[in-house]
Amino acid sequence: MTDINDNIPDRDEGVQNYRKIDRYNPELITSLSAHYQDILQQIGEDPNREGLLKTPERVAKALMFLTHGYDLDAGEILRSAMFKEEYSQMVVVKDIEVYSMCEHHMLPFFGKAHVAYIPNGHVVGLSKVPRVVDVFSRRLQVQERLTNEIRDCIQDTLQPLGVGVVIECRHLCMSMRGVQKQNSVTTTSAFTGEFLKEKTRTEFLNLIASKLS
Ligand SMILES: Nc1nc2c(ncn2[C@@H]2O[C@H](COP(=O)(O)OP(=O)(O)OP(=O)(O)O)[C@@H](O)[C@H]2O)c(=O)[nH]1
Ligand SMILES: [Zn+2]
């Protein structure tokens, strides 16, 4: 019998081209800060005025935080809390906050993710689902790839009977600039296994539409 972890790559595919860095290394932060100081100058600001003195360093640290998902291995996170359990109904974790940055403009997109799976002998610690969402969202992304990466990671690692992922986000590159549409929301979805069947998908979509109170 094949082991549930047999075909899992050590790190998820999204980091294939990622160069391993020591994210908060002081020298790296100093070097990045110098670039931001230059940027401040180039937009016509005075990087030496009091309010901006520490800004390059703050922005450098913020950017490192906003992209820290590159350092994390979502499969490993899931594998750290997988439990044998004969629960065979849908498990839904909904309204998971998403904060990511579009890879085209490096501007934020944010909203909610709804993730479901149907166990096949194993369940996963509930907190690990939002952690997986964070691993992939704290990178430069497009919403479609983010959606697929979450789906694939859960499917490949947990090997459930199916996975469903729906993500709804607002993109600042569409509201603060560009086409400047303030209220548009982008919805993406990705499914495997049982969720490819209409009945299961409808159950999932009904569950994420329902309110607790
Ligand atoms: N499919 C997809 N597109 C995205 C996402 N985030 C941003 N974009 C789009 O990426 C596209 C980049 O298009 P370009 O024409 O090269 O860039 P641009 O001239 O800045 O485009 P505008 O935003 O229309 O001004 C834009 O249409 C953005 O809306 C995403 O998550 N998924
Ligand atoms: Zn964008």
Image (cartoon, grey):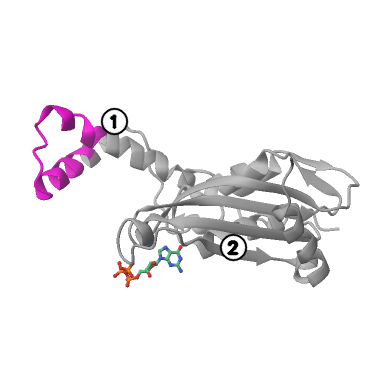
Residue shown at 65%/58% (left/top)?
Answer: 165
Residue 208, given in percent of the width and then of the height, sits at 71, 53
Tell me: 91 left or right of 138. right
**Alpha carbon distance from label 2 to label 1:** 34 Å
Name the residue: 48% across, 58% down. 16
Tag 2 secondary structure: helix
Q: Secondary structure at mark 1?
A: helix
Nearer the observer: mark 2 or 1; the answer is 2
Q: Is residue 10 visible?
A: no
Q: Amino acid at mark 1?
A: Pro
Placement of the N terminus among the 4 image quadrants: bottom right
> Residue 68, percent across and down?
44, 42
Magenta stretch encompasses residue 195: no
- In the depicted view, which residue is nearer to us: 107 or 156? 107
Residue 195 horizontal/vertical position (percent): 76, 65
- 58 to 131, vertically: above or below: above
For marks 2 and 1, the one nearer the N-term is: 1
Q: Is residue 40 left or right of residue 60?
A: left
Image point (13%, 27%), residue name: 50
- Residue 87: in sight, yes or no? yes
Check the image and report above or below for 118 versus 51: below
Which residue lies under the disc numbered 1? Answer: 26
- Majority secondary structure of magenta residues: helix
- Which residue: 9% across, 32% down? 48
Indicate whether residue 56 is drawn in magenta: yes
Magenta span covers which residues? 33-57
